[in-house]
Image (cartoon, helix red, strand yellow):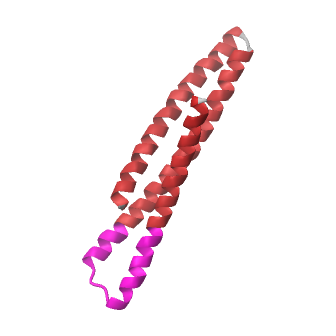
Amino acid sequence: MSGIILGIAFAVFTLAYAFIQNKKESLKEIEELIKNEGISTTLLRKRNSSTKFILKFKWINKDAVILIFISLIGLMIGYVFEFIVIHKDWYTYVLILILLFLIIMLFFLGKMTFRLLGIYKKQLV
């Protein structure tokens, strides 16, 4: 499960990063237009929209990075405990630890999903 979530987190991270870079290039072009032609309401609106977009996707990227680290830790714990013979009394604690990491991963995955859906919903309206 950690491997799947790790793959999703990497995909979200790379896509969000690409969107941010694309919007930064667009923002540079807008700033150049403002410098050359002067400020207008249309350019100001485009600049503000680009800035808000970048900030929203930076938060999504931050969540993706956190999810990547949590998934890696969960993946390593799963692999380590797969090869280590554990006393029967420790199985409960190991399962609780793995379940805790799974809950944290699902929390960040859900958080990213709802943020992305909110952004897309606003763009469609």
Return the x and y of residue 63 as percentages of the image width and height: 53, 51
In this view, the residue farthest toward the front is 125
Tell me the quadrant of the picture where the N terminus can be found. bottom left
Front residue of this view, candidates 35 and 59:
59
Q: Is residue 107 above or below residue 15?
A: below
Q: Which residue lies at the image location 58% right of the left edge and 18% below the top edge?
A: 29
Q: Main secondary structure of the magenta part?
A: helix
Q: Residue furthest top?
A: 37
- The answer to whether 84 appears left or right of 35 in the picture is left
Q: Is residue 52 above or below residue 104?
A: above
Residue 40: percent from left, percent from top:
74, 14
* Rendering coords of residue 36 (x, y %): 67, 10
User: Is residue 17 magenta-colored?
Assistant: no
Residue at image coords 43%, 41%: 14
Q: Residue at x 55, y 28 (%)?
A: 23
Percent position of residue 48, x then y:
68, 28
Q: Which residues are magenta?
A: 76-101
Quarter of the image for residue 45 reads top right
Q: Nearer the viewer, residue 11 or 30?
A: 11
Q: If the image is split into quadrants, where does the C terminus sit?
A: top right
